[in-house]
Amino acid sequence: MNQKTLIKNTTIVNEGKTFIADLLLSDGLIQQIGTISIEGNHKVIDGAGKHLFPGIIDGQVHFRDPGLTHKGDLYTESKAAIAGGVTSFIDMPNTVPNILTVESLNEKYEIASKKSLANYSFFLGVNGDTIDTVIKMDTTKFIGVSDDGLYFTKKGNLLADNPKTMEKLFSNCKSIIAIHSEKEAIVEKNEQAFREKYGDDIPAKYHPIIRSTEGCYEATKRAIELAKKYKARLHILHLTTEAETHLFQNDIPLQEKKITTEVSVHHLWFSDTDYERLGMLIKWNPAIKTEQDKKGLLKALLDDRIDIVTTDHAPHTLEEKQQPYFQSMSGAPMVQHSLNCMLEFYKQDLISLEKIVEKMCHNPAILYGMTKRGFIREGYFADLTLVDLNSEWTVKKENLLYKCGWSPLEGTTFQTNITQTFVNGNLIYDNGVFEEGIFGMPIDFINKE
């Protein structure tokens, strides 16, 4: 007899509404929502006093598999994601090798099928060297193409810094083009000025001045202008400045937008005042900027100029982080705590639960055309997260699941706790205990042209 899971008396947050109901899960799907009687073959989970969200979809992570697995891998980082309520992710192409071919992309899917506890998808990498090959492909087969992280392997790989390359891509590519938007010439000029003053040991607090608002704004403005010219489907990754938020629309629904953007949770959580305390641990590209930028990003998220929330989860070893400025690797782990961070903003009356679900669950599914994910609907995949909104705990090394073993949030006390996470109807995480023999699925999507 097929066992079904029944979640009883839980407070569902979905599609702008919050209501108490039961949920019946079977064959990986949500079978029924309503008042449901318990039957003999039901595994019953008491959801009373808890809130049920659709599983979080993280549209930008760096899980480091293949080739950089000393930092993290598709097993360890998906496990951390699941503990944080994240049930699906899209991983970036800056692994070793860079994911620049269909062959390497397929190999990555094969690795994930044997290691990832969460559902998965992967961007195809694109740079100046591969652009001609990519535009000859049927790009509708990819969830998106991206240059993110590829600038670490070679200067000149940022699309936003190469108008001719961007024009070629925008005029030919039929998938989402997700770009890292900074102007390298401005960054390099600033780097040189600070190097002359401090040598290699530049204090971390100058990172947002080196990777400046001007460098971000000029790159984003130009990319948007070119995307509009060619009617391309452009997504600007990890927005960091209040100035850039004014370049985006909120007067049409997300389904109709050709140009979209996101904010990564650390750019809402930290500001430049935190460099003194955390130093290189919060060195990200683009940089964490001012308190005004942080507030401007949240405002744009609330009024729908910013479409989704991501983590840009990018683990490095502590040794790699605790180097002088130019040697310190950019990025940090966040995927285990992104929902907790957003729920802390809810506790501060800065955002509603419904808006959190919209930006972390519904909108990523809409933006990337994901099939039957991101919503609590009958017939949809049962990707779900149960949360206790009144359960205090503190981030410590002992409760971190990242392979790198550290977090810039260590010592932070959260008021909410993810208690259970379901992936495709399977209870993968239950109050600290994992079901590790069941792996996630590749995410089906329809690429809108």
Image (cartoon, rainbow, N blue to C red):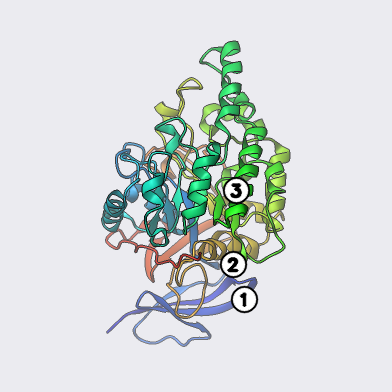
Q: Nearest to the eye among marks 1 and 3: give it.
A: 3
- In this view, the residue in front, 402 or 211, is 211
Q: Position of residue 14 (x, y in %)?
A: 58, 71
The answer to which image quadrant residue 383 occupies is bottom left
Q: Residues within 10 Å of mark 1 (few under 14, many from 20)?
A: few
Q: Which residue is painted at 48% across and 80% down in the image?
A: 378
Q: Position of residue 300 (x, y in %)?
A: 70, 52
> Under tag 3, what secondary structure?
helix
Q: Is residue 282 left or right of residue 381?
A: right
Q: Amino acid at mark 3?
A: Leu
Q: Position of residue 349 (x, y in %)?
A: 72, 56
> Under tag 1, what secondary structure?
strand
Q: Nearest to the eye among marks 2 and 1: give it.
A: 2
Real-space Cα separation, disc 2 to disc 3, in angstroms = 21 Å
Q: Compare marks 2 and 1 and give the one earlier in the sequence.
A: 1
- In this view, the residue in front, 329 or 391, is 329
Q: Residues within 10 Å of mark 3 (few under 14, many from 20)?
A: some
Q: Amino acid at mark 2?
A: Gln
> Under tag 2, what secondary structure?
helix
Q: Nearest to the eye among marks 2 and 3: give it.
A: 3
Q: Residue 19: which numbered mark, if any?
A: 1
Q: Compare marks 2 and 3 and give the one earlier in the sequence.
A: 3
The residue pinned by badge 3 equals 226
Residue 74, can we see it? yes
Real-space Cα separation, disc 1 to disc 3, in angstroms = 44 Å
The residue pinned by badge 2 equals 255
Q: Residue 185: which numbered mark, if any?
A: none
User: Is residue 447 positioned above or below 320 on the image?
Assistant: below
- In this view, the residue in front, 88 or 423, is 88
